[in-house]
C-alpha cells in the first residue's frame, strides 16, 4: 500500500521561509512523479506544482501564484519530495498535501499517449503565515 | 475565480441520483481528460474517477464519470449519507501549463 507522510508545517512570519517534506513508501519512488496541492482554510483545492521522475528529466512545473517563490525537489535515496517555500504571504496559509502522480497510457495507431493524474494523497501538513 | 467551474452545492434525497457538473474550455476539458476527487469532512481528498470515466480499484460503482465537449460530469447513484462530502474535478490546462481544480461542490444528502 502506498503511503505518504508530510511534515514541516508550522507558523511562520510574512516574508519568511518554510520547507515541507513528504516521505513515500510502498512504491517505486525513483519512477514516481510527485505533486503538491494546498487547501486554504474553508476553501477549495489548489494545485501547487509537480516534479517528474529523474528518468523523465526531473523537471518541475508550478502554479502561477507560487512560481518563483516555491521550489520542489526530490531525493530518491530517501524516498522524499520537498517543497521549499520562500517569500511567504498570508495567502499561502493552507493545508499542504503531497500526492503521487500516476499515468494512464494508451495507443492510437503507432503513437503512445500518456495521461497523468494525482492518485494517492497524504494526510497533509498545516502552514500558517501571519 | 477558477477557469473550471462547478456548482457550489447540490442536494438530493437518499437512494436518489445526483450529478455534479464541471465546465471548462477548449484549453482544458476540451483537450484533456478529467479526474474527480471526494473529500470527506476533515479528511484528505480521495481519487474517484480518472481519464474521464475510469474507476480506480475499490471505488464503488455507484460513482460514474462522463465528458462531452468542454464539460464533464460526476454522477452518484443510490445516494447514501456517507456520500456527504466535497467533490472536485481537476484537469490539465494547456494554456496555463498547470492542473486546475474546479471550485468544488458540497453534496448534501437530505
Image (cartoon, rainbow, N blue to C red):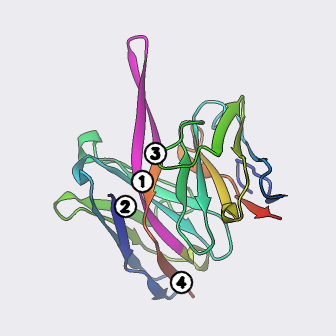
Give percent across and percent down for residue B73. Answer: 71, 41
Q: Is residue A16 left or right of residue B105?
A: left
Image quadrant assignment for residue A19? bottom left
Disc 4 crowd rating (10 Å Cα; few below 14, some 14-19, many 20+) is: many
Locate the C terminus of chain A and report the quarter of the image it occupies: bottom right
Where is mark 2, residue-wise?
A72
What residue sits right under mark 3 in the picture?
Answer: B57
Dot 4 falls on a residue whose secondary structure is: strand
Structural distance between the alpha carbons of marks 4 and 1: 22 Å
Look at discs 4 and 3 and give the one toward the viewer.
Answer: 3
Q: Is residue A111 left or right of residue B8?
A: left
Measure the C-alpha gap from mark 4 to mark 3: 35 Å
In contact (CB < 8 Å): disc 3 and disc 2: no
- Which residue was labeled with disc 4? A128
Give the mark, 4 or 1, whose residue is nearer the N terminus. Answer: 1
Number of the label disc, if any, that sits on residue A50:
1
| Helix, strand or loop at mark 2 | strand
In contact (CB < 8 Å): disc 1 and disc 2: yes
Q: Are marks 3 and 2 on the same chain?
A: no
Name the residue: 66% across, 57% down.
B87
Asked which secondary structure carries label 1, the reply is strand
Q: Are marks 3 and 1 in contact (CB under 8 Å)?
A: no
A101 part of magenta stretch? yes
Judging from the image, mark 2 belongs to the subunit labelled: A
> Are the residues flagged by discs 4 and 3 from a single subunit?
no
Crowding at label 1, few (<14), some or many (≥20) Cα neighbours within 10 Å?
many
Residue B17's x, y, as percent? 78, 47
Amino acid at each position: 500500500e502506498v503511503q505518504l507522510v508530510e511534515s514541516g508545517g508550522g507558523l511562520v512570519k510574512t516574508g519568511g521561509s518554510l520547507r515541507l517534506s513528504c516521505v513515500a513508501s510502498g512504491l517505486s519512488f525513483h519512477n514516481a512523479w510527485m505533486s503538491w496541492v494546498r487547501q486554504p482554510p474553508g476553501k477549495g483545492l489548489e494545485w501547487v506544482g509537480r516534479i517528474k521522475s529523474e528518468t523523465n528529466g526531473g523537471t518541475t512545473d508550478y502554479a502561477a501564484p507560487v512560481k518563483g517563490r516555491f521550489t520542489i525537489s526530490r531525493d530518491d535515496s530517501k524516498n522524499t519530495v520537498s517543497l521549499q517555500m520562500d517569500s511567504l504571504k498570508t495567502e499561502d496559509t493552507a493545508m499542504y498535501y503531497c500526492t503521487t502522480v500516476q499515468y494512464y497510457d494508451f495507443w492510437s495507431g503507432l503513437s503512445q499517449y500518456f495521461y497523468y493524474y494525482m492518485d494517492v494523497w497524504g494526510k497533509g501538513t498545516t502552514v500558517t503565515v501571519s | 475565480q477558477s477557469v473550471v467551474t462547478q456548482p457550489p452545492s447540490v442536494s438530493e434525497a437518499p437512494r436518489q441520483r445526483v450529478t455534479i457538473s464541471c465546465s471548462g474550455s477548449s484549453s482544458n476539458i476540451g483537450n484533456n481528460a478529467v479526474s474527480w476527487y471526494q473529500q470527506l469532512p476533515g479528511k484528505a481528498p480521495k481519487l474517484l474517477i480518472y481519464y474521464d470515466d475510469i474507476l480506480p480499484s475499490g471505488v464503488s460503482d455507484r460513482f460514474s464519470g462522463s465528458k462531452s465537449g468542454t464539460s464533464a460530469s460526476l454522477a452518484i447513484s443510490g445516494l447514501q449519507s456517507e456520500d456527504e462530502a466535497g467533490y472536485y474535478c481537476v484537469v490539465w490546462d494547456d494554456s496555463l501549463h498547470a492542473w486546475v481544480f474546479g471550485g468544488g461542490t458540497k453534496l448534501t444528502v437530505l
